[in-house]
Amino acid sequence: MAEIIEEFFTGYCRNFDMTQTVICEFEQLPDGLHLLDSSCEYGDCKFSKDCTLMKQALDKENT
């Protein structure tokens, strides 16, 4: 079974027009981290494509 890693990211949320903290769950796989879930509406939010907050999590996934 793969290890699950939780990490907190803080930044500006355009949807709520304020600073938010988002908890993300990553799965540790042999080829790196894979984002499983986040505590925000990323993907459904109208600002998802320009979200600087979730960009932090996606950058972590890609490194």
Image: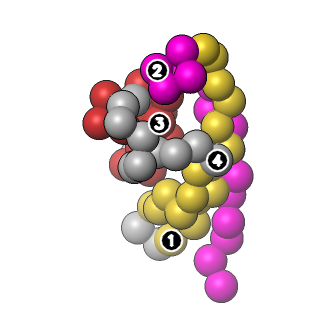
Report which quarter residue 16 is drawn in. Answer: top right
The amino acid pointed to by label 1 is: Leu
Q: Residues within 10 Å of mark 3 (few under 14, many from 20)?
A: many
Whether 57 is drawn above or below 36: the answer is: above
Residue under pointer 3: 54
Q: Which residues are magenta?
A: 1-17
3D distance between C-alphas at marks 4 and 2? 15 Å
> At 64% across and 37% down in the image, what residue appears?
22
Q: Is residue 10 left or right of residue 41?
A: right
- Residues at badges 3 and 2 in contact (C-beta under 8 Å)? no
Q: Nearer the viewer, residue 30 or 21?
A: 21
Q: Is residue 49 visible?
A: yes
* Mark before the other along the chain sequence, 3 or 1: 1
Q: Nearer the viewer, residue 27 or 55?
A: 55
Question: Picture coordinates of residue 33 (x, y %)?
Answer: 49, 59
Residue under pointer 4: 39
3D distance between C-alphas at marks 4 and 3? 11 Å
Dot 4: what SS? loop
Residue under pointer 1: 29
In this view, the mark in front (4 or 1): 4
The amino acid pointed to by label 4 is: Ser
Extreme-bottom residue of the structure: 1
Mark seen at residue 14: 2
Quadrant location of the N terminus? bottom right
3D distance between C-alphas at marks 3 and 1? 20 Å
The amino acid pointed to by label 2 is: Arg
3D distance between C-alphas at marks 3 and 2? 11 Å
* Mark before the other along the chain sequence, 4 or 1: 1
* Mark before the other along the chain sequence, 1 or 2: 2
Look at the image and say whether residue 3 sits in the magenta stretch.
yes
Q: Nearer the viewer, residue 36 or 42?
A: 42
3D distance between C-alphas at marks 1 and 2? 31 Å
